[in-house]
Image (cartoon, rainbow, N blue to C red):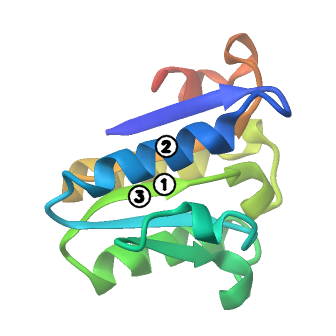
């Protein structure tokens, strides 16, 4: 399942995704991973949630990001929750250019029974259809 947290800049998307990650940390039976491109929120995330700054792994671009997410799941088959804060920033693409990434996330979520939560800096009515269907 994919969940979208959307809104304009300063709407509190990061705060919402952090609350979701921390809230699920107590009930998760498997592994949770929080993926972002900054260490700013490292200490806001519960210790049981794996905090990953993609800059530590030189992830650049959409293809590298897709491979990175697949590697996280392949590296630990107990992965249950994946949180992605700022997918457009991480990939260096605009939301309308991320159809392939969302297709991959959907396939991963369905194949491995994952719950993937993604923040998108865009108002709900302006989301591309391939993202809006997850709202």
- Disc 3 crowd rating (10 Å Cα; few below 14, some 14-19, many 20+) is many
Q: Earlier in the sequence, mark 2 or mark 3?
A: 2
Instruction: Give the answer, above or below, for where 79 lies relative to 53.
Output: above
Q: Which of marks 2 and 3 is in front?
A: 2
**Residue 102: percent from the left, percent from the top?**
53, 46
Q: Which residue is drawn at 67% across and 63% down?
A: 41
Marks 1/2: CA–CA distance: 11 Å
Locate residue 112 relative to residue 96 in the image: left or right: left
Marks 3/1: CA–CA distance: 4 Å
Instruction: Give the answer, above or below, for where 34 lies relative to 134.
Output: below
Q: Residue at x 57, y 65 (%)?
A: 35
Q: What element carries label 1?
A: strand
- Disc 2 crowd rating (10 Å Cα; few below 14, some 14-19, many 20+) is some
**Residue 21: percent from the left, percent from the top?**
43, 51
Q: Give the residue at the far top of this rendering.
A: 125
Instruction: Give the answer, above or below, for where 6 lies relative to 79.
Output: above
Label 1 belongs to which residue? 83
**Residue 123: percent from the left, percent from the top?**
75, 19
Q: Nearer the viewer, mark 1 or mark 2?
A: 2
Quadrant (top left/top right/bottom left/bottom right) for the N terminus: top left
Q: Which residue is drawn at 52% across and 73% down?
A: 51
Label 3 belongs to which residue? 82
Q: Is mark 2 on a helix, strand or loop?
A: helix
Marks 2/3: CA–CA distance: 13 Å
Q: Residue at x 42, y 81 (%)?
A: 71
**Residue 63: percent from the left, percent from the top?**
64, 70
Q: Give the residue at the far left of this rendering.
A: 29
- Disc 1 crowd rating (10 Å Cα; few below 14, some 14-19, many 20+) is many
Label 2 belongs to which residue? 19
């Amino acid at each position: 399942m994919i969940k979208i947290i959307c809104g304009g800049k300063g709407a509190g998307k990061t705060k919402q995704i952090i609350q979701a990650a921390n809230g699920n940390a107590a009930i998760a039976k498997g592994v949770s991973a929080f993926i972002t491109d900054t260490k700013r929120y490292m200490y806001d995330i519960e210790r049981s949630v794996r905090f990953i700054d993609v800059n530590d792994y030189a992830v650049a671009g959409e293809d590298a990001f897709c491979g990175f997410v697949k590697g996280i799941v392949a590296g630990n088959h107990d992965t249950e929750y994946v949180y992605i804060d700022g997918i457009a920033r991480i990939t260096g693409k605009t939301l309308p250019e991320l159809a392939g990434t969302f297709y991959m996330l959907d396939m991963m979520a369905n194949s491995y029974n994952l719950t993937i939560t993604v923040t998108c800096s865009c108002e709900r009515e302006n989301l591309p259809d391939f993202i809006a269907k997850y709202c």
